[in-house]
Amino acid sequence: MGNRSRALMIGLGVFFVGVAALARFYAYPTLAVAPADQIAHTVSAGPDATIFSIAELKEKGGVELEARRTVRGDVAAAEKISKALDRKVVVFDTAVVTDDSKNYQFPDDASKTDEMPLSFVQERVVLDAHTGEAVRWNPSGDDNSGEYIATTLEKADRLKPDQNSPLFKGHEGLVLKFPFGTEKKTYKFWDSTLRKAFPIQFKDETTLQGLKVYVFEQEVPKQDVPLAKPLMVPGNLVDEPGRDSVEVQRTYKNTRTLWVEPITGAIIKGQEQQHATIAYNGEDKLVATQVTIAYDDATVTKNVKGATENGVAEGGYQSKASQLNLIGFWVPLGALVAGLLLFGFVGFRQLRPRT
């Protein structure tokens, strides 16, 4: 082998090894971040639910519940907080509306309390852009970029993190997604009802519409729900007919199952088996909510294949995972093998006996 040929092959080997290093240690970390401008909508259906009707003051069975979640990224806040914390974060405003009517819309007048949804939770979360872990951000003064949780549309009702408050100490654990490169292990996942994180365990590996997913399951043990003010009901509902109203406690437990695409950490499907009661003197008296509610088929298909909603592309994690896997695994592997083969060939030609 001539000197020029040897130099060319060594140069190509260096080039391919460099491509492998750049793809794995620069391109992949650059791409493996949650998009700050993400917009997502999910719909969950809960057929044959049992609820407590406040209007009728009784339990109602055979109810079909629908929960609609909207997630919207705040790019300006993400840039501001990332700079302040010197780490890459994303900021999402989320809202989950649950009602027994499809496509529920809030009334135009907040005083129409009888037209309010059965359940409403609004949150702002700050997440590490790589791991999906909640990041504490509670600025002082007039800065409204901090995390909060609320059950009404009124800004005055938003609870900000307070370590001394029984209502909201701040987000913790995973909230909306799992880490890029999700592992088969136990994580901590946020529960908005109890406002704390609980362990969520890897259970299985399966496929959804041809997409490989990890199945995680979380058991949220029965606990009292934190209340901002006492919950009062007529005494006759809890076997106290002689009293106009008595103070009761709402309890809650849940079995949450999540199907996660492991390369991107995206939640492809979610299901909850919720059981909430109204308890009096430590004894369950009424069912507040009992339902198994899960992403509908259209939401799962959108998350896998992708779809456009209101002119914005959403989901499509099958192709996103393939692209990320190509950059993070196959390109570095292929380039490294090519580089090493070139080095090996040059070495072989140099060391073989000459005639």
Image (cartoon, helix red, strand yellow):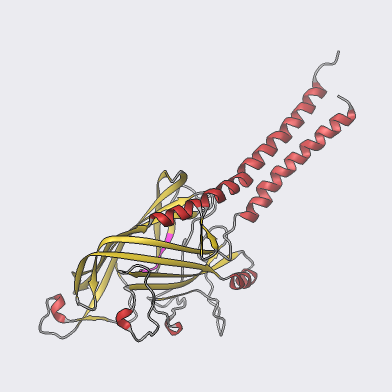
Q: Quadrant of the C terminus?
A: top right
Furthest toward the right, the residue is: 3
The quadrant holding residue 230 is bottom left
Q: Is residue 353 above or below residue 38?
A: above
Q: Is residue 135 above or below residue 339?
A: below
Instruction: Mark yes or no: residue 221 visible.
Output: no
Q: Position of residue 113 (x, y in %)?
A: 32, 83
Would you say 95 lies left or right of 51 here? right
Q: Residue at x 59, y 49 (%)?
A: 324
Q: Position of residue 336 (x, y in %)?
A: 69, 38
Q: Residue at x 33, y 84 (%)?
A: 112
The front one of 39 and 342 is 39
What span is in magenta?
Answer: 189-194
Would you say 33 lies left or right of 299 here? right
Q: Residue at x 70, y 38 (%)?
A: 335
Q: Is residue 158 above or below residue 92?
A: below
Q: Quadrant of the N terminus?
A: top right
Q: Position of residue 350 (x, y in %)?
A: 82, 24
The quadrant holding residue 255 is bottom left
Q: Position of residue 296 (x, y in %)?
A: 38, 57
Q: Is residue 32 above or below residue 142?
A: above
The front one of 154 and 15 is 154
Would you say 32 lies left or right of 23 here? left
